Amino acid sequence: MYLILLGAPGTGKGTQAKILAERKGWLHISTGDMLREQVAQKTQFGVEAKSYMDRGALVPDVLIISMLQSRIREPDAARGFVLDGFPRNLAQAKALDHALTSTGKNIDLALNITVPDEELVRRLSGRWICRTCGEIYQESTRPPKVAGRCDKDGGELYQRNDDKPETVRQRLADQKPPEDLLRHYRRKGKLVEIDGTQKVEDVTKALLDAMKAGVPA
Ligand code: AMP
């Protein structure tokens, strides 16, 4: 299956994409993670992307589309993937359609996880991530057992630059899935809305149920 998880930052699409990919043996492709890797390696691409990421803006399509297109052409993407963080706009969606159809594939479902804004601000400002394994913690709902340390491997927890409160509101303003993107998948009969305010395991169940039910009528 080729799945897309849509949703504003903080809706839990990263967490859910990881869970689904692990359960189903699919590849998890997160454009945010790919970009952060480039930033950490200080590649020319990473340096350019960082200036956008740090202020909560989207990286220009011309940079991100070619990165995604080469990733989905790699052999490990052939068994299915969960896309997390891409597409963010209609141009990206069209480029994705094009890249897939040229290899005889198609998106099966676009699952849009929705959460009210006030809840998103609270979630993002309290998000901490393990530097070693990428595990995600949430100050109020899922704190680590020892402050600042990962439960799994003791790694140091850090807060993403773009999760700092001053950037969070900008990201929400700029990065909610735009209506024309949702319409693109709705018209194809592939959009399913999922209530992201439920517990993590209930959101996973809703996603799995939607996948079982297949393409909506
Ligand atoms: P994320 O981890 O998905 O929240 O992404 C972190 C940051 O990476 C975003 O705030 C954007 O600056 C950038 N980014 C990730 N995916 C995309 C995309 N598909 N298009 C443009 N920018 C992106």
Image (cartoon, rainbow, N blue to C red):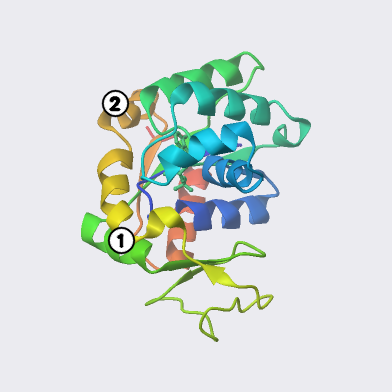
Q: Quadrant of residue 177?
A: top left
Residue carrying label 2: 180
Sequence-first disc among 1 and 2: 1
Give the percent coordinates (x, y) of residue 86: 48, 35
What amino acid is labelled 1 in the image? Answer: Pro
Identity of the residue drawn at 49% across and 41% down: 50
Please state the total of marks drawn on the protein image.
Answer: 2
The residue lying furthest to the right in this view is: 75
Quadrant where the image shows the N terminus? top right
Q: Is residue 130 visible?
A: yes
What amino acid is labelled 2 in the image? Answer: Asp
Along the line of sight, which residue is nearer the eye, 95 or 55? Answer: 55
Along the line of sight, which residue is nearer the eye, 13 or 53? Answer: 53
Along the line of sight, which residue is nearer the eye, 101 or 58? Answer: 58
The residue lying furthest to the bottom in this view is: 146
Residue carrying label 1: 165
Identity of the residue drawn at 51% across and 33% down: 48
Give the percent coordinates (x, y) of residue 83: 54, 39
Q: Quadrant of residue 119?
A: bottom left
Identity of the residue drawn at 65% across and 17% down: 104
Q: Mark 2 Cα within 10 Å, few/some/many (few <14, many 20+)?
A: few
Side of 89 where 129 appears, left or right = right
Q: Are marks 1 and 2 in contact (CB under 8 Å)?
A: no
Which of labels 1 and 2 is toward the front?
1
Q: Is residue 214 visible?
A: no
Identity of the residue drawn at 47% across and 43% down: 213
